[in-house]
Amino acid sequence: MKRERDMNQNPLVASLPFCRRAKKLAAKYLREPNLKKGGLDLGDILAGSAMEYIYQSKAEDPPYIWYKGGGSKKMKILPPMRTWADECRLAPELLRAVERAGYKEPSPIQTAAIPLGLQQRDVIGIAETGSGKKAAFVLPMLTYISTRLPPMPRSSNEENQREGPYAMVLAPTRDIALQIEDETVKFAKFLGIKVVSLVGGRSIEEQGFKIGQGCEVVIATPGRLTDCLERRYADLNQCNYVVLYEVDRMIDMGFGPLVVGVLDAIPSSNLKPENEDEELDEKKIYRTTCMFSTTMPPAVEQLGKKYLRNPVVVAIGTAAKATDLVTQHVQERQDKCGSNILDFARH
């Protein structure tokens, strides 16, 4: 009883619309070692004042989802989605494609990254191989193209070739790039969005011709895209969506300078303001940049600091535990009373 009285002596906690059981449950969370390290108090958990929190899915042995950064007074970090249609704002055509693909429930990286991508936030996603990272950026990317940008003309002319695609995905190897192409085509089939891959082992002239006919999305390896840019087969003048996939691997393979060269080839006029509280021009199209990786070495951090604007870092499971990304977090339990705690933190 003394503990309950102590909890309610805090005016903030006492004023919150939660039962004593909820407050006791929150106090129990605070005794867990990982929450103690975050330095949270009971008011933080109940009022949701911490910008970062951990979401625990319904799986029997769920991985953790960690968030860091990217929050401001004008734009809050959206909570993870529970289902494909849960406050997700995915286009009906994409939901149809997801159903056709047999994706019953979103994976943890998808639940966390897709809502942020639909906010047009810059995202750094860290998750293990096979965790569903591809769909985590493909679906927001296709939503961005289909809702924010005009249809791409389908004709072979100099203007199309000069302006280039709306979105670019860089991958470390030919095989991974082709896997991403398959995933993108699978989801884009009902939207009429054209996807072109630029990889080695194929005719660069033929690939340049396909880009010149007009395409919304280019998926490439750093070396082949650099060749296409140097030969003027491709341009990135209207590239407004950039994804660096397995960026840690690209750097390990020595592609860091090529990646930087490609990013520098994109006009900087469409970058978001560095000040996170600065008003955005609603009529202007800003660049969205995402990085997905299995680890977060210093080289990846430096790349993110240079080319991303106020990114939200999302790390999953053991990948999250291997990084020092989180200083504060709140944990949700699959408990009726505990779920109210996180629900309150979302608003």
Image: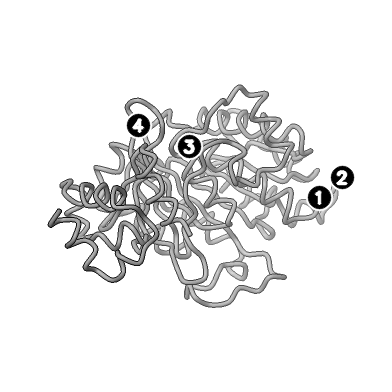
| Distance Cα–Cα, label 3 vs label 4 | 17 Å
Q: State the residue position of label 1.
A: 151
Residue 302, horizontal then vertical, whole percent: 35, 59
- The structure residue drawn at horizontal position 38% and vertical position 38%, both measured from the top left corner, is 127
Three-letter amino acid code at the position of disc 3: Lys
Pointer 1: residues within 10 angstroms few (<14), some, or many (20+)? some
Q: Residue 192 falls in which quadrant of the image?
A: top right
SS assignment at label 4: loop
| SS at badge 1 | loop
Of marks 1 and 4, the one in the foreground: 4
Residue type indicated by callout 4: Pro
Q: Could you say where residue 177 lies in the image, as x and y percent from the top left?
A: 55, 34
Which is more N-terminal, label 4 or label 1? 4
Q: Residue furthest front?
A: 1
Gap between marks 2 and 3 measured at Cα: 33 Å
Q: Is residue 242 left or right of residue 21?
A: right
Quadrant of the image occupied by residue 214:
top right
Per the model, the C-alpha gap separating discs 2 and 4 is 48 Å
Query: Could you say whether the residue bearing mark 2 is in a helix, strand or loop?
Result: loop
Q: Which residue is mark 3?
A: 133
Q: Nearer the viewer, mark 3 or mark 4?
A: 4
- Judge whether residue 228 can be spotted in this image: yes
Instruction: Report the amino acid beneath label 2.
Output: Ser
Q: Residue at x 30, y 62 (%)?
A: 44
Tell which of 252 and 76 is nearer to you: 76
